[in-house]
Image (cartoon, rainbow, N blue to C red):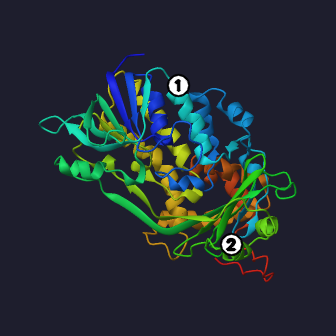
Amino acid sequence: MTQLGARAVVLGGSMGGVLAARVLAESYAEVVVVERDRVLGVSTPRRGAPHTVHAHGLHARGHLILEELFPDLTEELRAAGVPTGDLGEMRWFFNGRRIQPAHTGLVSVTAPRPVLENHVRNRVAAITNVTLIEECDVLGLVATADHEQIVGVRVRRRTDPAEAEVIDADLVVDATGRGSRTPAWLDELGFQRPEEERVKVGLAYTTRHYRIRPEMFDGVQSINPVASPAHPRGAFFGQVAPDVCILSLTGLLGDYPPTDPDAFLEFVRSLPVADVYEAVRDAEALDEAVSFRFPASVRRRYDRLLRFPGRLLVVGDAFCSFNPVYGQGMSVAAIQAMTLRSHLRLGRPPEPHRFFADLSRVVDTPWDISAGGDLDFPGVEGRRNLKVRIGNAYMARLQYAATKDPEVTNGFMRVAGLMDPPQALMRPSMVRRVLRHAIRRPGPGPSWRDTTPAPAVE
């Protein structure tokens, strides 16, 4: 393969950063990953990524890409005790109703996020032309005199805080996440900041880990009552190790799941289905509950900028950060890495405008899924255009039909797993299946503590 430069520098050593480093190593003589935390060999949550303590899943499309980039990774994870299973065979609840399980053939990996990242990071660190610099702060970009090209980054290693240094680069990739400073750096260099699209969800996760008992899951990998407008409290309850399971409670619009043990359990009891409460009400907790807040999904429109410095790219959550309840983050990072690889294989350094245009197309579908789904909640701020209203009305019907028809579940999971585009759910054969069960928009299923069924609405 054509070598495109002497050195590429990746800012950030989380999933988006190490996947970018993996594909850059094919085209640059040296790849340097700069990370502010100590990460090599670390398989527990770290200061710079507090959200990783909560439930995560690597689903379908992301799993396939990681297996392509790191052959036999799935078997490596299984050997380490990481649970894997079929995405459609988990116990899913939408609108308070359980959908029919379906064997989809789509693998879901429910490793703790730090464990999965550690396996992937170790694979990348073992590549001979990749160097990972830990505990190193990025101070800023280094540009040419006319500011038109980025030629390096200024960093300071915490082991020697008095001395700043410059790492020269033929390409810099910002994978520093939601807190990315690229917008501010652009401003300093005389460029326009990207516009931002925001969907304010006011989400909070609160998580505890428990010792697994055989009867908890009854043969399924996880139990997931997903939040809906009528039942806005949700949970992800799944196996993450041979004898450990995780329970992440979710609340929207300021309804934050508490950390106090009794209040935490009462929140579990308030879920629309009894399954999770009955599993954990007398279970052995392994830690104290911890919370993480996610105020808004944010999409930075780098693709709309008319001017942008050369030799600088932005990926991952620094480009687009999704509501985490949809489980898209790691899979989208993997898809972005493959987009970067396709640009590298053109035989020339990636051109930012073309790269951002392609990256924007990559995030269009997951953004529509998550932002559109969030706008079904009346309290979420945002523009509900005709596409959003029709989409949410149809999705309510489809999720109800999935409680009757496993083929609907299969189609739904292929879209949720980013294998098929949402348009696949509008194929005539699928529409017929959906309307067979739900011509009108169904009302929500009742809570397990209230057996009075809700009326159907138009």
Q: Residue at x 61, y 72 (%)?
A: 257
Tell which of 295 and 425 is nearer to you. Answer: 295
Numbered disc in front, either 2 or 1:
2
Pointer 1 local density, CA inside 10 Å: few below 14, some 14–19, many at least 20: few
Residue 372 placement (x, y as % from top left):
51, 62
* Quarter of the image that includes the N terminus: top left
Numbered label attached to residue 261: 2
Q: Crowdedness of circle 2 by 10 Å Cα count: few (<14), some, many (20+)? A: few
Left or right: residue 218 compared with residue 195: right
Location of residue 27 with respect to 171 vertically, above or below:
above
Residue 401: quarter of image: bottom right
Element class at badge 1: loop
Is residue 420 visible in this depiction of the protein?
no
Q: CA distance from mark 2 to mark 1?
A: 42 Å
Q: Looking at this view, is 208 or 457 the one in front? A: 208
Label 1 belongs to which residue?
126
Q: Quadrant of residue 122?
A: top right
The residue under the point 21% across, 35% down is: 149
Does residue 378 lie above or below 129 as drawn? below
* Residue 416 point in image, percent of width and height: 62, 51
Residue beneath the point at 49% across and 72% down: 380
Q: Residue at x 78, y 65 (%)?
A: 280
Residue 27 lies, in percent from the top left, at: 40, 22
Q: Is residue 395 above or below residue 348?
A: below
